Image (cartoon, rainbow, N blue to C red):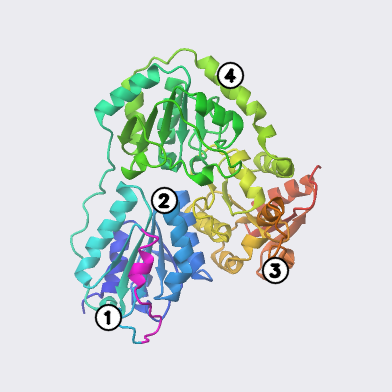
């Protein structure tokens, strides 16, 4: 008996290097599971499809490989829509494979189970592309398209839906891809022009975004060769080590850095959107007066927000490598002057945070002293994490995650679980607010079942603290933002987690160190009303 399309799907995913799938089986996806037991793919069941999407996201961000989730028709897709939209906004490679009603029923509105007018049209709004497989012979080709997106261009989520009747039809393996398609390299003339501009610059500045995450070695070589002060976006944290003499960290919104960029005679921008969310902390505007060299793997992105004098359509790694090679071995002069400039700005950055962040900074300093450089920090939208985006020192790429573009609450816990599954050898610490945790609290059960020893730091400000503060600042009477949280320690213990409260820095330090060593999922509740001075 020939393999079904559902079984062939598993074989093809295996051939593409997929070893992990997140999903909740349903009546419309049973055929997709037929071949899983006999494959090299491990399946993880979250407690909500949004959790499946966020777990796949965390897996993808920490590994650089696409995260994969299986979704049921209708509510499975709509439940995961927020996670897919977050991945789309943050350029995360994610493959969502869903079922859909039978081909003869599509768009008919006959009241079938899980029916939508057009699930394909819905998913196309937050994916690079959405495809409905109407013939099993299409499957190898559409999967090849998906992995080309992940490997060869600006990544993002892809949705493939397979009707119930197509799933059970005889499958077609097709011809496997011989090799991955390489990302584009730079135009040699543009590289020559850019090198001349950089070599003649007296006050250059480099800005590295999430598109440079896999070009850390080349980025370090470039800033050292040209002696360029480097600013990172939040998505680019770790591209240059936080303690490098030329690194200003993710400090883009702060006055001294904005002034440095405003006065620069050359700007090198690599893999960044210049997104609003990179400047949200202060609400400042980015002013660029000098000529810009802009490197991006997506052509349209090269002219969004700022138009460069020298646009370079290229993978960041290839372009930076070419710039360094073209420049030769001789470093530019006045390197010490630029290192001194970076040192002076670093010295005043702490004073740029508002007074309300002082407590955050003390806690983050403690975290930096306890956590090693390889620890993956996964953050949610919460006040402690907003400060961490700029203040927490990151020395390696893919070690700090934040739902930056779409800003979805509930991201951190499931993403941290996915990250731990993707890189089980790395410690994973999750920073989440009490409000955000309640969005995906149920995934504590999944973490216990999976045996993923993440450490969950709950910043408990008894509600939606950031929105509450914004209402007060704008003269609006706070409504809907003061929440009565549960006893998180009791809840965590109910799920089988270790659980603690920390009311002092000393207690937080000892509890965090013990939790990291325990090998068990651990929750540490931090009362945001405490001073944390000792």
Q: Is residue 464 visible?
A: yes
Q: Earlier in the sequence, mark 4 or mark 2?
A: 2
Q: What residue sits right under mark 3 in the picture?
A: 491
> Which quadrant is the N terminus positioned in?
bottom left
Q: Are marks 2 and 3 in contact (CB under 8 Å)?
A: no
Viewer-side residue, 231 vs 107: 107
Q: Earlier in the sequence, mark 2 or mark 3?
A: 2
Q: Residue furthest front?
A: 475
Q: Is residue 34 visible?
A: no
Q: What residue sits right under mark 1 in the picture?
A: 165
Q: Residue at x 57, y 24 (%)?
A: 342
Gap in angstroms between the C-alphas marked 4 and 1: 67 Å
Q: Residues within 10 Å of mark 3 (few under 14, many from 20)?
A: some
Main structural element of the magenta stretch: helix, strand or loop? Answer: loop
Q: Earlier in the sequence, mark 4 or mark 3?
A: 4
Q: Give the percent coordinates (x, y) of residue 303.
A: 35, 40
Q: Are marks 4 and 2 in contact (CB under 8 Å)?
A: no
In magenta stretch: residue 119? yes
Q: Residues within 10 Å of mark 2 (few under 14, many from 20)?
A: many
Q: Earlier in the sequence, mark 4 or mark 1?
A: 1
Give the answer, above or below, for where 231 lies relative to 228: below
State the SS at label 3.
helix
Gap in angstroms between the C-alphas marked 4 and 3: 50 Å
């Amino acid at each position: 008996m020939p393999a079904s399309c559902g079984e062939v799907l598993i074989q093809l995913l295996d051939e593409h290097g997929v070893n992990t799938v997140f999903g909740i089986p349903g009546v419309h996806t049973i055929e997709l599971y037929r071949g899983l037991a006999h494959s090299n793919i491990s399946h993880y069941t979250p407690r909500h499809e949004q959790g499946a999407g966020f777990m796949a996201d965390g897996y993808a961000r920490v590994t650089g490989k696409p995260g994969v989730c299986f979704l049921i028709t209708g509510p499975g897709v709509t439940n995961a829509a927020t996670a897919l939209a977050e991945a789309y906004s943050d350029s995360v490679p994610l493959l969502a494979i869903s079922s859909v009603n039978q081909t003869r029923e599509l768009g008919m509105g006959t009241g079938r189970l899980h029916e939508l007018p057009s699930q394909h049209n819905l998913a196309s709004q937050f994916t690079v592309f959405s495809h409905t497989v109407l013939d099993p012979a299409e499957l190898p080709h559409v999967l090849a398209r998906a992995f080309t997106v992940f490997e060869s261009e600006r990544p993002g989520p892809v949705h493939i839906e397979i009707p119930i009747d197509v799933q059970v039809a005889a499958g077609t393996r097709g011809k496997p891809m011989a090799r991955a398609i390489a990302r584009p390299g730079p135009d040699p003339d543009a590289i020559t022009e850019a090198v001349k501009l950089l070599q003649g610059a007296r006050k250059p500045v480099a800005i590295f975004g999430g598109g440079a995450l896999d070009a850390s070695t080349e980025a370090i070589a470039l800033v050292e060769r040209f002696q360029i002060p480097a600013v990172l976006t939040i998505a680019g944290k770790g591209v240059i080590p936080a303690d490098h003499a030329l690194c200003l960290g993710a400090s883009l919104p702060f006055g001294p850095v904005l002034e440095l960029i405003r006065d620069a005679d050359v700007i090198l921008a690599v893999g960044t959107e210049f997104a609003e969310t990179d400047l949200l902390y202060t609400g400042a505007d980015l002013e660029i007066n000098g000529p810009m060299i802009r490197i991006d793997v997506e052509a349209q992105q090269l002219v969004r927000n700022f138009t460069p004098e020298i646009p370079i359509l290229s993978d960041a790694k290839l372009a930076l490598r070419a710039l360094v090679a073209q420049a030769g071995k001789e470093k530019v002069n006045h390197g010490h002057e630029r290192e001194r400039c970076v040192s002076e700005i670093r010295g005043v950055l702490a004073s740029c945070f508002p007074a309300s962040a002082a407590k955050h900074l003390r806690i983050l300093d403690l975290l930096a002293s306890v956590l090693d450089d390889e620890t993956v920090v996964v953050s949610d939208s919460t006040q402690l994490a907003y400060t961490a985006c700029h203040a927490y020192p990151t020395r390696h790429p893919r070690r700090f995650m934040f739902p930056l573009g779409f800003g979805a609450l509930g991201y951190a816990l499931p993403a941290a679980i996915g990250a731990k599954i993707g890189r089980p050898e790395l410690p994973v610490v999750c920073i989440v607010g009490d409000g955000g945790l309640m969005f995906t609290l149920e995934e504590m059960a999944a973490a216990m079942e999976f045996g993923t020893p993440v450490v969950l730091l709950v910043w408990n400000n008894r509600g939606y603290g950031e929105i509450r503060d914004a209402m007060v600042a704008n003269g609006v009477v706070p409504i809907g933002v003061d929440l009565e949280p549960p006893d998180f320690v009791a809840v965590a213990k109910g799920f089988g987690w270790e659980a603690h409260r920390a009311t002092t820095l000393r207690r937080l330090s000892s509890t965090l160190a013990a939790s990291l060593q325990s090998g068990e999922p651990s929750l540490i509740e931090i009362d945001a009303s405490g001073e944390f001075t000792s």
